[in-house]
Image (cartoon, coloured by chain):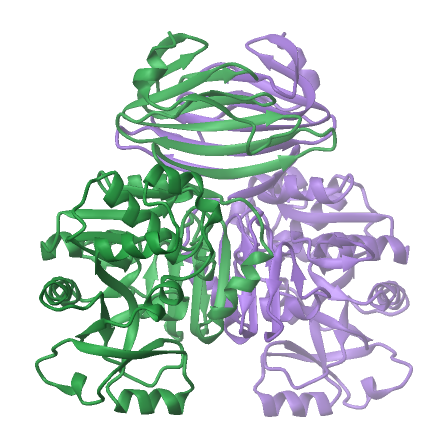
Chain colours: A purple, B green
Amino acid sequence: MQLVLLSGGSGKRLWPLSNDSRSKQFLKVLKHGDKYESMVQRVSRQIAESKISKHIYIATSKEQVEVLQNQIENPNLIIEPQRRDTFPAIALAGVYLFSKRYVSPDEVVCVLPVDSYVEDEFFKKLGDMERHLKNSDADIALMGVKPTQPSEKFGYIVPQSSNESAAPDQKPVKVGSFVEKPDHDLAQKLIDNGALWNCGVFAFKLEYLINSLIERGISVSHDDLFQNYQNLRKISFDYEILEKTNNIIAVPYDGAWKDLGTWNSLTEEIDDPVIGKAIVGPECSNVHLINELDIPVAVLGIHDAVVVASSDGILVSDKNSSQNIKEISNHFDARPMYEERRWGWHRILDYSSYDDGRNVLTKRVRINSNKNISYHYHELRTEVWTILSGSGHVLMDGEIKSVKAGDVLSIPPRTKHSIKANDYLEFIEVQSGYGILYDDIIRLCLHWEEVVAHT
Amino acid sequence: MQLVLLSGGSGKRLWPLSNDSRSKQFLKVLKHGDKYESMVQRVSRQIAESKISKHIYIATSKEQVEVLQNQIENPNLIIEPQRRDTFPAIALAGVYLFSKRYVSPDEVVCVLPVDSYVEDEFFKKLGDMERHLKNSDADIALMGVKPTQPSEKFGYIVPQSSNESAAPDQKPVKVGSFVEKPDHDLAQKLIDNGALWNCGVFAFKLEYLINSLIERGISVSHDDLFQNYQNLRKISFDYEILEKTNNIIAVPYDGAWKDLGTWNSLTEEIDDPVIGKAIVGPECSNVHLINELDIPVAVLGIHDAVVVASSDGILVSDKNSSQNIKEISNHFDARPMYEERRWGWHRILDYSSYDDGRNVLTKRVRINSNKNISYHYHELRTEVWTILSGSGHVLMDGEIKSVKAGDVLSIPPRTKHSIKANDYLEFIEVQSGYGILYDDIIRLCLHWEEVVAHT
């Protein structure tokens, strides 16, 4: 079986921890043993432990490439040129497997969201889905979560026969129809008739997807589709494929399944009510606090609230109001202060702009073991690097030399430069000039072998 | 009349805005016209506008000297060598006026707390106190605030005759006794009998204080007293002098008088509910937010709370719980992140410590027009300065040169250095070394004329 994890979303609802480069699935807030892992790390670990498949791909956009490389060891990435909803994403992934990886049309592909917060049992069910697809004439198999309450937030999978899913052996049921976000009474009626929640997990034989694309006149060559990706309609897989497919089965899953997309739901799964440097007064109740800053946070006499502090901002919200964050965070169009990158991370410490038009941006930068930043130059800004700790090599205008803690490097505009860590390397970067533009960077090459070729 | 403002306190109750170097009286949160002023600036302005005296002194400790010089133009400072309560502070101030300024023993000295939040009328009353002292045989005149409720928090001045202070012409009353923090019922009874709140404003002829000191065997030479200051008892002026003086009058003041010593009381006087980069959701009520950071703060669904963010920390408190901050902030023994200094200010941007024992502290430093930092050196640390904006002169190991935006200076351990601004100067300072100690600084001289003498 081929597994495709869909890693989407900008995750503004978890501001200020999530931002354009750090979606909710990358936040390391879920405890596992002594350590914290992100949703994408948790799902990857659960899949590995379940041993259901060795063929795991992550379908994502280019903005997430570096953070995925940072959080997952050697991920197989299928990169969308732009965001266009789940049908285009799944189409591109299927075509990639078909035309680039030569996966047999007969093989089962299972697609699941990377931010599914589920129990290990869930992943065993993926094996059941594959088995049932192979042993039946069904075109698509879905995972159907047994509802725990008549929620108005979810889509419901309605079985053809109302008795089917009540069976104790949890056999798959034939799907009759779908109902999106019913009101409370209808939801209760659907549940009474054996309906299941649609959790966005789809399995199908690769040929079923490929044939569906051919029928729609969509190219099944990856290079073609990648080139013309912007022409695909922005539509969900549910609307474009599921609702037009007659022969669908659903495999019931009777365990926990959660959408950790709001602070209210996420904090329910965070064991430690307080993460980071903080004091929560004993008179507080039901307060969750996550502090990623170096300065302390004190919370006194507050109830039913979430307090989150990061380099991007500070949130103080009643738990029930936390779903309003998405709108609020749109007001703050600041660039992310903290970013994970392919080679490590950087954090903005200070930004100043002066009356004479001069701008200065100060960053702390970490480069991980044996990693390097690209060989590049800037048109406008000067950079000054003060090496804090670690050692490595720097290449400036074709000349390579070793650097260590205490060294200071001045890099004027148009000077080509790159730096590579031995074990690790940390430095303070002061960018200054008349205009510091985010895209004032001309990258010459990425890999150190190519960088060294410039000496 | 000689006015002595007492500037005391470490102001931990207004954490995270106040810290050891920035007490509550220095916080610029009170609106005046378009600008914000601190309590000390407000009181100084009110005194100047009232024209009651040109002889204004501020009694303070050496920790506050630089911030006072920064906030008040050319303050006359009487500096305690250490903190020892109000009796020693007033004794030192009186002796300073007597032995250093040759103030006539016959002249009236009026002492008032620098953090009195009062109406302009209050300062006119100071003139009344002087007049009544001169026209009566009273030894001490107090300001007595007309109580607005039977508060249990204050000290009460009880008149000898219960009818006196009810007089509409607000004549001074003879003081019979003092009651500290009575319970509610006693407070009501005292108020019914004409008692007034003691707001810590004392006036006396200088000779009365000097004679009181001589009686106690305390030196009335300033240099002597300064040298032996640590031998003075830590006791308040109220206990040591007031309660032992028979002939005291109180001048009633019928206007606003507030103790802005907690977030709850301070925010009542802050016109703008939101100061700084922030969004407070429309569903919030009675929320005050002060954000001194560059990153935004969002508050959603919260009521009756104060949210304060500064370089030192973040506070989220129910307004009624805000008096508990003092204890809480004792847990955070971090050094202040933001400090106002004689020559400008500096703010810590980042602190890192590495496994090999290396420490790095990154600061943003501003030097104001024509100011300079001391000529000094460090034993252990290297400093790297990247000039952000402005221009000035730097002296390193006897050599002077001009500096401007874009320049980078490396200052190894034991290298003597100073820097002076022309209009202003801002730079990023990266301190690094094996051990960065706060007191690893050997100051050679303070004033630029002396600094230049080292070339």
Please give left or right for residue A242 compared with residue B330 in the image: right
Q: In the image shown, does B282 or A239 lie closer to the viewer?
A: B282
Q: Quadrant of the N terminus of chain A?
A: bottom right
In which image quadrant can residue B221 be found? top left
Residue A95 visible in the snapshot: yes
Residue B39 visible in the snapshot: no
Q: Residue at horizontal 81%, vertical 54%?
A: A34
Query: What percent of the width, then of the height, locates residue B189?
Result: 32, 92
Look at the picture and state if B367 lies above or below B449. below
Q: Residue at horizontal 50%, vertical 57%?
A: B314
Please give left or right for residue A238 compared with residue B213 in the image: right
Query: What percent of the width, then of the height, locates residue A19?
Result: 53, 51
In which image quadrant can residue B403 be found? top left
Q: In the image shown, does B212 or A93 lie closer to the viewer?
A: B212
Query: What percent of the width, then of the height, locates residue B197?
Result: 29, 76
Q: Residue at horizontal 18%, vertical 83%?
A: B165
Q: Quadrant of the C terminus of chain A?
A: top right
In which image quadrant can residue B331 be found? bottom right
Q: Residue at horizontal 42%, vertical 49%?
A: B293
Q: In the image shown, does A441 or B449 lie closer to the viewer?
A: B449
Look at the picture and state if A341 lies above or below B135. above
